[in-house]
Image (cartoon, helix red, strand yellow):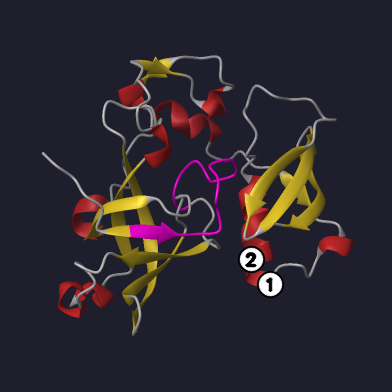
Amino acid sequence: MELKPIAYMRSDFPEKFGIPRQSGLVKELKSSIVFEKEYAIAEAFRGLEEYSHIWIIWGFSMNVGKEWSPTVRPPRLGGNIRKGVFATRSPFRPNNLGLSCVKLESIEFTENEGPLLRVSGADLMDGTPIYDIKPYLTLADCHPEAVCGFAAKTADYSLQVEFPRKLQGILEEKQQKALIGVLAQDPRPSYQQDPERIYTMSFAGYQVSFRVDKDVLTVCDMIKG
């Protein structure tokens, strides 16, 4: 079976570090799906505007050539407890496929790029290849009674984010809110707990540096580029 991308993600994350570990965790994140010319046909999207959410089937493009492992160490469990790869959403899988559910904000028909899907809550890096999209169906996809296994133990985990006044206003209000939501999810590897260590992540054209002391994350600086 041969898969080829039908579209690519356009997001504020040029690198993996900092991207939310799951879709929907940071609803303020805005991004776009840009289709290859072959699939940028208006008729292919007829009726999609009737749905509020979509599934994205995409590829872990940064993992090409890397071997999969039957067990992995979920970050939310501290990085020192192993679970079976099929019990996790680890990117190191037999096939480098990811699945994300995002909110479909709008469909914009542009002259140069054709149909653009404006979405929110995505957990994809800029340039990620997308292999298919499907509508989210509440009658089939929503299971309120579902059990979330060990993932439920850390579902409510978040950090308090301190954003210095001197740095406020650098980003647009909505982007700043999205960044705060991303930082609250704690981008660090779970096994790193040094309160003096400075971390840097790329977001919306800026290098954002921060440190974490206990449950408080403090943004240190934001540098363009």
Whether residue 47 is visible: no
**Residue kind at label 2, given as amino acid type:** Gln
Label 2 residue SS: helix
Residue at 34% x, 51% y is 129
* Residue that label 1 marks: 172
In magenta stretch: residue 23: yes
* Residue at x-position 35% and y-position 27%: 65
**Residue 111 at x, y percent in the picture:** 34, 85
109 w.r.t. 8: above or below: below
- Asked whether disc 2 touches disc 1, contact meaning CB atoms under 8 Å apart, the reply is yes
Magenta span contains residue 38: no
Image coords of residue 162 (percent x, y): 81, 51
Let me know if residue 218 appears in the view.
yes
How many neighbours does mark 1 have within 10 angstroms: few (below 14), some (14-19), or many (20 or more)? few
Residue 54 location (% of width, % of height): 30, 60
Q: Is residue 52 above or below residue 13?
A: below
Residue closest to the eye, 170 or 78: 170
Residue located farthest toward the bottom when viewing the structure as drawn: 111
Q: Quadrant of the C terminus?
A: bottom right
- Horizontal arrangement in the rendering, residue 215 relative to residue 83 (left or right): right
**Residue 161 drawn above or below residue 42:** above
The kind of residue on which mark 1 rests is Glu
Q: In the rendered view of the protein, which quadrant contains the N terminus?
A: top left
* SS type, badge 1: loop
Magenta part of the protein: which range? 8-24
Which image quadrant is residue 105 in? Answer: bottom left
Hey, which quadrant is residue 45 in on the image? bottom left
Residue at image point 40% right, 58% down: 9
| Residue pointed to by mark 2 | 175
